[in-house]
Image: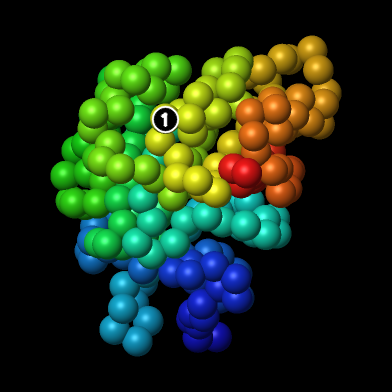
Amino acid sequence: MHLKVKPHPKFKEIYQVMLEDGAQRLATKNLTPGLRVYGERLFKFKYVEYRVWDAFRSKLAGAIIKGVQNVPVEPGFKVLYLGAASGTTPSHVSDIVGDAGHVYCVEFAQRSIRDLVNNVAAYRTNISPMLEDARMPERYAMFISGKVDSIYCDVAQPEQAKLLADNADVFLKPQGWVMLACKSQSIDVTMEPNAVYRQEANILRNRGFDVKEIVDLEPYDKAHAMIVAQHL
C-alpha cells in the first residue's frame, strides 16, 4: 500500500495521511525540512516534506481527530500560545500559520522553555518564546505587536478559563477566537470532568465569549476537553 496525503476537508494547511500500513494520521508541511521536534516521523510526498502529527502527544491533533468543527489557526494568523511547554503542538501551529503568521509562546517552566528555544524557536523565525507566567499578561504585553487572531491555552492551572479571558482582554482581536485545552484534574479533582468543562465554558460566556463546542479528548487525553469559543 502506498502512502497517500490529502488536504483536510475543513482546515487549511492540515493534512490527512494514510501510511503504508493503512493507518490514518494527521500531518503538517514541515516549515524546517529535515528537522524533527519530538521524534515525529518525516516523509516526502510529491517533493514536499510533511511531519506526522501525533494525537497522543498533541491535544489540538486529538481534537481535530475527535471532530472539532472550529480550528482558528490558519496561514498568516497571529496566535498567542499559553503553556507552550517544549513546543510539540506550537511547532505544528508554526507549520500551519507559516512565514506570514506568528506564534507567541508563553511558558513558565525553565526546562521546557529551554527545549522550546533550542529545539524549535532557534530554527523557526515565526515563533517567539517567552519565559513568563500566563496569569500576568501585562508582563509580556510589550513583546506582542498588535492584536492576535486567536489564543490557544494549555496550562495546568486551577483558573484556566479566567486566565484565558484575562489574556484575551489584552491581546485578542474583536471577534477573535480562543481554544482552551481544559484539564479537569487541575481545576477540581472532586468534580466530574463534564461538570468542570461546563463550569469553565460558563466562565468564558460570562466574559463575553460565544462557546461554540466542547469536545472530549478521550482516548488521546484522559479527563480533558477542548473548548472553542469566539469573542462577541
Quadrant holding the N terminus: bottom right
- Residue 52 vertical position relative to residue 122 in the rendered view, above or below: below
Query: Label 1: how many residues lie within 10 Å, few (<14), some (14-19) or many (20+)?
Result: few
Give residue 225's position: percent from left, percent from top. 69, 38
For image coordinates 52% across by 80% down, the residue present is 6
Which color mode does the image show? rainbow
In which quarter of the view is residue 112 placed?
top left
* Residue 93 spot, x, y in % from top left: 40, 53
Q: Nearer the viewer, residue 88 or 42?
A: 88
* Residue depicted at x 52% and y 55%: 72
Residue 8 visible (yes or no):
yes
User: Residue 153: percent from the left, percent from the top?
Assistant: 51, 35
Q: Quadrant of residue 142?
A: top left
Question: Residue drawn at (45%, 40%), measured in percent from left and top?
Answer: 172
Where residue 192 sits in the image (x, y, percent)?
Answer: 83, 23
Quarter of the picture holding the C terminus:
top right
State whether residue 105 is above or below residue 127: above
Name the foreground residue: 111 vs 91: 91
Query: Residue at label 1?
Result: 170
Callout 1 secondary element: helix
The amino acid pointed to by label 1 is Val
Q: Is residue 110 above or below residue 172?
A: above
User: Viewed as shown, does residue 116 lie left or right of 149?
Assistant: left
Look at 34% across and 54% down and name the residue there: 94
